[in-house]
Image: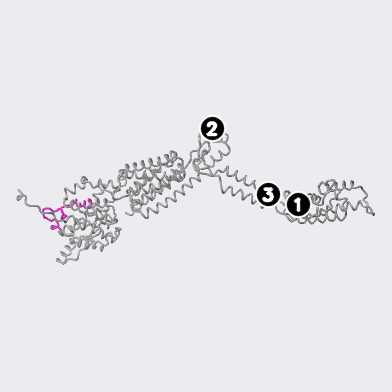
Amino acid sequence: MINNKNLIKSFKLLMLSALLVFLVIVVYIGSLPQRFDMNIGQVSDIDISAPRTIVDSYETNKSALESKTSIKPIYVRSSDLSVISSDRVESFFNMCQKLRDENMSSEGQYLDSYRSLATQLQKQALSTYAIELSDDEAFQLVTADPSLLRYIRTQSINISNLVILENLSSQNLQEEIEKYIDTIDDSDLSFYVSNQNLILSLLSDLILPNVVVDTAATSFAEDQAYDHAIRNPILIEKGTRIVSLGDVINDHQYQMLKDLDLLENNTFDLSMFAGIFVYMLSIFVAIAVYFVRFESETLNHPKNLIAILIAFLAPVVATLYLSDISPLINTVFFTTVIIATYLGIQSGIVISLIQVLIILPIQNFSVESIFVSVIGIFVCAVIAGQKRRKFNSASLIVFTAISCFFASFGFSLVTKATRFDMFTSGLWAIISASVSVVAAIGSMPIFELISNTVSPVRLIDLSQPGHPLLKRLFLEAPGTSQHSMMVANLADSAAEAIGADALLAKVGAYYHDIGKLDNPSFFTENQQSGANPHDAIPPNDSAAIITAHPDYGVRLARKNRLPNSIIRIINEHHGSTVQTYFYHKAKTNAAQTGQPEPPIQEYQYKGDIPSSKESAVVMLADTCEAALRSNGINNIADAEVLFRKLIKNKIDQDQLINSGLSFNDVETIIRAFLQVYAGYFHERIKYPDDNNVR
């Protein structure tokens, strides 16, 4: 037994590992874009569009460089340059005064002519300060009265000292000097040049710009402008044509093809493969947690695991080939129908959503595909997972297709897609949803054959009276057959009342006593002649025959390939209760003969206690129907008293602790049983004697 469990565990680990490797390879292959052998200067023989939205690195980098070069230099005031300008002004007037003093006689007369002095001043100003004095300016400086020259000197120095306190560039230097020119006295207009014009001209040439470029600040501003452009990249939207037929491939187009990984390189993309492996591993961890928590029973059966893997892998492999046609071709509804039908709505939704995540890289992470898939999965799973068969197969196909169409239509409206794209998307949504659901419905018999699971369609087939086991039961154990029919009616009514799978409970009730086919005459309902074979054998032998019928029923069910859910009901319909009639008979015989009291284990059923609501409902229906028949009760009041007593006994024996039934469910079941018997117990009208009529 231990070796068998270890073998099953090893098999499951092997299957899951193989599945992970297989899916990683499939998704990697499906994620690789179509590549092209292109070079700069080559003429394209095909139209190429962007398969996904990416950053246009070429244009983004170009824009960033333009933003960087557009930054103007940042200047700061230099104290050293300001001092130089101040010194230039003062030294210039010192030069003028020296020239005047050196050419002045002791009597106060100039030794040279004014023209000669003016020329000397022009030459010295040009060579020393690189400024060109006009003739009028030079004459003014060498001929001005000493008091006037002092005034011009003082005003020039004062203004220069005020001006150099500002940030002076070559552009604003003149403007800053002109701010103070109006303060200069120009009352004497007899000179060659007015004082204002002379001082303005001299200071404009003598004062130098006192700002220097702040290299660090300028570089920082340039970097900020560059980074801002990089952080706000130019995008190439998905579907944008980047190369047209006949284009000569330029640097920009080549870079776009390179960024989109569309250039043929004949190399294995290790980083992409590693990324997909991590991506898939995280998904596997999530689905493993779900199965361990909610579907652990399913994993215990290797056949069920194989069937689930087939249902899961088929759409993934199909997507690998169909995604090139359109990313909106959804095959996940195949899995949704299969899983929701056999494992329920919750598992159908969860596993299908996991599958959507797996095929996302193959579909280039299409948001529209995600949206349409999610909407369709919810609708499809809710319909396919209905246990009461409220919807038929046609409804499943129609409603799934319609929901996908409206999801696609709504998405197109929100994204303002063109009419053509809107029509194309809606058409693919309808076609893919319909084909996936039809394929799933058609494949159900194959999955039932592989996994031995049960679907509503198969349950309906098993409920037909023509099934070999039901025919045998009717012919070989007619009393048991009638009993099973009544138990089925009770189970059907009660299961529907509490929201359980009524069809499963009903069909399970049909087969719950097939184990009595081994020795039908040992069960009272089949003893037509009045002879009871138990009278001739010891109580322990009788108990062995009676308590063995669930085990024989399980073996017979497996031989006839009944679904596991039906087999579970057969095994659990008596739980671990005690065959009290023969146990008390054995105790009485032991007391009369002075023997020790027999062990109760010999008179106990060897089955498991009910593990589902449906199995518990069949147990209670079987117990109540058999007791009612043996006690001969024919009114509702007595029936209710008996039912409550029997069900309380089952609760006291802990037979319902794993069934999931609440006390409210138990009360609902009792009312459902009574409602069935209310119709069974009704009084019929007594018809008159036919002889009187004749």
In this picture the colour scheme is: one colour
Q: Which residue is mark 2?
A: 246
Q: Quadrant of the N terminus?
A: bottom left
Quarter holding residue 248: top right
Q: Which residue is mark 1?
A: 178
Q: Nearer the viewer, residue 382 or 179?
A: 179
Q: Earlier in the sequence, mark 1 or mark 2?
A: 1
Q: Is residue 519 magenta?
A: yes
Residue 474, given in percent of the width and then of the height, sits at 17, 48
Callout in the foreground (2, 3): 3
Alpha-carbon distance for marks 3 and 1? 25 Å
Residue 95, given in percent of the width and then of the height, sits at 85, 52
Tell me the SS state at disc 1: helix
Q: Which residues are magenta?
A: 510-537
Residue drawn at point x = 36 percent, y = 41 percent: 435
Callout in the foreground (1, 2): 1
In the image: residue 444, left or right of residue 532: right
Residue 395 — which label? none
The image shows residue 267, relative to residue 287, as above or below, that is: above
Please rate how many residues cluster around mark 2, counting C-alpha atoms within 10 Å: few if below 14, some from 14 to 19, many from 20: few
Tell me the SS state at disc 3: loop
Task: Residue 262: tell me if it is visible.
Answer: yes
Q: Is residue 286 magenta?
A: no
Q: Which residue is mark 3?
A: 73
